[in-house]
Image (spheres, rainbow, N blue to C red):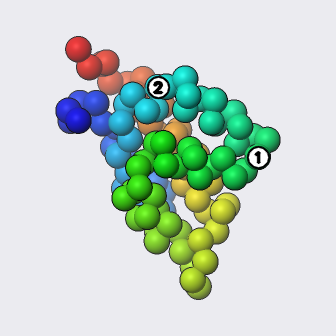
Amino acid sequence: MLEDTIIRGTTQSGFEFAIDRNAADDWETLKIIRKTNDDASYIVDLAERLLGPEQVRRLEEHCRVDGKVSISSINKEITEMLDQAEQLKNSQPSPA
């Protein structure tokens, strides 16, 4: 993956992430986001699509408290990543 196709950011809680610009700007990703409004379990599919398995594992560990991974913490982090990705995507020129 070329460096300019990656959107990088850090959430307020300190989680550093990298999202493929194409995954953030994808019809199928949007469909998954819509599904999360009706069924929160789709956040798993969304995280895997945006972050891939390694970053999802890191995110789970980042959100783990007392041995449990809070769904609301994961949801908050993913929402923040999407917001940042949208802002960064709109502020940078598209790759050639």
State whether residue 16 appears in this view: yes
Image quadrant where residue 75 sits: bottom right
Q: Amino acid at mark 2?
A: Asp
Q: Is residue 90 above or below residue 50?
A: above
Q: CA distance from mark 2 to mark 1?
A: 22 Å
Image point (45%, 58%), residue name:
56
Image point (49%, 49%), residue name:
48
Task: Give me the disc on residue 39.
Answer: 1
- What residue would you read off at disc 2? 25
Image quadrant where residue 1 sits: top left
* Marks 2 and 1 in Cβ contact (< 8 Å): no
Q: Residue furthest top?
A: 96
Task: Give me the disc on residue 70.
Answer: none
Give residue 32's position: percent from left, percent from top. 62, 36
Q: Is residue 7 left or right of residue 39?
A: left
Give residue 31's position: percent from left, percent from top. 63, 29
Give residue 94's position: percent from left, percent from top. 31, 18
Estimate how packed mark 2 is, as few (under 14), some (14 to 19) or many (20 or more) residues with alpha carbons within 10 Å.
few
| Badge 1 element | loop
Mark 2 or 1, nearer chain start: 2
Image point (72%, 50%), residue name:
40
Q: Is residue 3 above or below residue 60?
A: above
Estimate how packed mark 1 is, as few (under 14), some (14 to 19) or many (20 or more) residues with alpha carbons within 10 Å.
few
Q: For marks 2 and 1, give the one nearer the viewer.
A: 1
Q: In front: 60, or 87?
A: 60
Q: Amino acid at mark 1?
A: Asp
Q: Is residue 35 left or right of residue 53?
A: right
| Badge 2 element | loop
